Amino acid sequence: MSVSDQLAAGEPEGVSSGAVSIAQASKLLRVPMPTLRSWELRYGIPESDRVSGKHRRYTAAEMHALRLMRDEIARGTRASLAARSVRALLGVEGPAGELIQSVLAASDRSDPKGIRNELSRAADLLGTGPAVDEVLLPAMRQIGQWWQTGRCDVDQEHLTTEAARSWLDKRMAFAPPPVMSNPLILACGPGDLHTIGLEALALLMRENGWPCRVLGARTSTDSLVTSARAAAAAGVVVVAHLPTGRRRALASIAAVHDLRIPVFYAGNAFSTPRSRAQLPGVYLGTRLQDAAALLADHLRS
């Protein structure tokens, strides 16, 4: 069974065996039929080898791909970027794919120790950076999708999140002492709640010798400015995912820039070139390993 088939298993929204028509898929997903056709024709979501002229029917794995696409777009992601994200998630195979499945299985068992053990195994096999980008974050995205579609409840989502954060905290505690003097400040935008990506980036930077201070969720502009000034920060990272919080995140970025402290930013709120036009600072992209390397290069220059 492929990774995408395994991820689709157990979904209550859709079909567990057989296939459904496009009209049924539209009703189940609450997505218009023309939109489903557009996703397949323009973006290849879902991938299909059907024969031209035959009536379109969607398998369980294809329904899962459509759910992922729908939910990415619902979070404000552009369709082209949402399709790229879906293909990346469904295309994970080999050791990383197997490790994702192990993390998800431990989550289904409500086994926080098992989640931490699988993440440690991923770091041992792949290294910390790949374990974060290729196992931790895809697994957490999948848990988020499960919660949104009713595949898991909020208790399972919270348990998995806290287990992942605990694993990051432990790795941070055992990281080598920082060799740089001025800290890097990392904060969510004033409207953003999710901190796992921020904490994971802090771990990668700490392993590169940088002291890091994570201010966490919903950091106000005033709190960010006060912390950056008091710490004589080497740089500040602002992460914002929600389009509704973008304006306040922009105010934070501008305020740090006015302090003449290097400012960096990331997240879905800045995923398009247009959303980054005329912004001060440096966009860090979508992969944390690349973001850590870019940060280190800029801060050392």
Image (spheres, grey):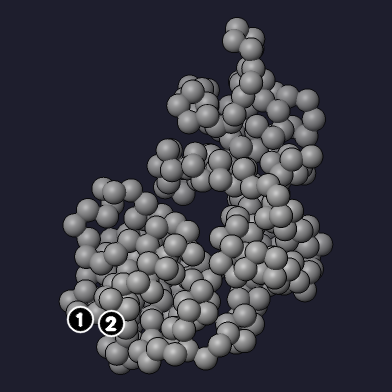
Q: Position of residue 239 (x, y in %)?
A: 40, 66
Instruction: Give the quadrant of the N terminus.
Output: top right
**Residue on which disc 1 sits:** 259
- The residue that appears at 39% across and 58% down in the rendered structure is 285
> Which numbered circle lies on residue 225?
2
Q: Mark 1 is on which residue type?
A: Leu
| 256 up-or-down from 146: above or below | below
Q: Are marks 1 and 2 in contact (CB under 8 Å)?
A: yes
Q: Residue 128's x, y, as percent? A: 60, 70
**Measured from the top left, where is residue 232 in percent x and y?**
29, 90
- Which one is in front, 158 or 40? 40
Mark 1 or mark 2: whose residue is earlier in sequence: 2
Secondary element type, mark 2: helix
Report the amino acid beneath label 2. Val
| Front-lying residue, 74 or 40 | 40
* Mark closer to the observer (1, 2): 1
